[in-house]
Structures are given as structure tokens and as C-alpha cells.
Amino acid sequence: MPHRHHEDRVYTVISGVFHIGRGDEFDERTPEAYPPGAVVALPRGTSHFRRAKSGEYITRVTAIGPISLEYVDVRDDPRHT
């Protein structure tokens, strides 16, 4: 579900295909596909969501903490169930 982080993040795709969409609303049609070796930079505060459309993927996430996670819609946050 769409969420954001207070820190800049860089995703490096190790294996599989990483699908990531940007925006405050989930839309299954909008994620972009990134193959192994791709690097995706998300500036802090960028609303986004990830998908495993074609199976498993592995990414390395780089950020300077403290690490944060804020869901656009608090009802999507499993920490509040």
C-alpha cells in the first residue's frame, strides 16, 4: 500500500524484477519494472508502493536513519490492527 519515508532511499535490484509505483493511491497499472542491476532513488517524502508482479525479487535498500515508515492511509498500517 502507498507509504513514504522521512529519509532518502536508494534501492538496488539484486535479482528478479522490482516493480515500484509512485503516488498516494495504489494503482496496479502504474508500477515501473526494474531489472537486476537497476538503481532506484526515492527522495524523502515520495509516496510509493512496491509489487512482486513477476515473482520474487531481492533489493538492497540504502538510507541514512533513523528509518521511518508512514502509510498514506493509516488504515493500511498493519501496526494498528
Image (tube, rainbow, N blue to C red):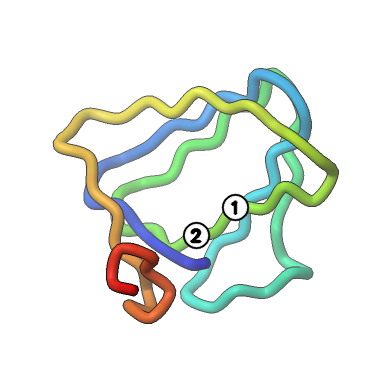
Up/down of 18 relative to 73, above or below: above
The x, y position of residue 80, in whole percent, is 28, 71
Choose mark 1 or mark 2, whichever is in front. Answer: 1
Residue shown at 37% from the left, 68% from the top: 77
Residue shown at 47% from the left, 37% from the top: 41
Which type of secondary structure does the marked residue at label 1 adopt?
Answer: strand
**What amino acid is found at the position of numbered circle 1 in the picture?**
Arg
Task: Bin the neighbour count of mark 2 within 10 Å (Cα to Cα): few under 14, some 14-19, many 20 and up.
Answer: many
Check whether the beta carbons of the residues at disc 1 and disc 2 lie within 8 A of each other.
yes
Residue shown at 67% from the left, 53% from the top: 51
Up/down of 62 relative to 6, above or below: above
Q: Which residue was labeled with disc 1? A: 50
Task: Bin the neighbour count of mark 1 within 10 Å (Cα to Cα): few under 14, some 14-19, many 20 and up.
Answer: some
Q: What is the CA distance from the residue labelled 1 to the residue labelled 2?
A: 7 Å
Q: Which residue was labeled with disc 2? A: 48
Up/down of 74 relative to 18, above or below: below
Which type of secondary structure does the marked residue at label 2 adopt?
Answer: strand
